[in-house]
Amino acid sequence: MRPVLVVQTDLLNQADHPFTWVLPCTTRLTGDNLLRVCLPRGIAGNAADCEVMIDQSRSIDNRRFRRLLGALPRAIRAEVKHKLTLLGEI
């Protein structure tokens, strides 16, 4: 399984929900834009430079998780949150 960034609220975790909301990552780099956030190699245990795909959110079955890579720095988490908020504006 490819790396994903978990963005789910703890409210669903506490409800023992069987799925988790994630943003997939890709190594097909497009550069900084509204729909991507750069994750340099090793920043959260990722083996290669990759980008979080902001517009590709999905839910995956919790049984698909294999291992924890690590936490993101605060600045990257803030950028992801900001871009998700922008895409959600109506």
Image (spheres, rainbow, N blue to C red):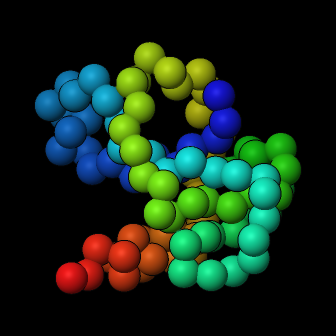
For the C terminus, the image quarter is bottom left
Can the viewer see residue 10 in this picture? yes
45 relative to 88, above or below: above
**For this view, does 31 lie left or right of residue 88?**
right
- Residue 37 location, x and y as percent? 62, 70
- Residue 88 location, x and y as percent? 29, 74
Can the viewer see residue 78 in this picture? no
Residue in the image at 56% along x and 48% along y: 24
Residue in the image at 78% along x and 57% along y: 28
* Direction top: furthest residue: 63
47 relative to 85, above or below: above
- Residue 19 location, x and y as percent? 32, 30
**For this view, does 8 lie left or right of residue 45?**
left
Residue in the image at 64% along x and 41% along y: 3
Residue in the image at 59% along x and 33% along y: 68
Q: Quadrant of residue 58?
A: top left
75 relative to 9, above or below: below
- Residue 52 location, x and y as percent? 60, 59
**For this view, does 8 lie left or right of residue 82?**
left
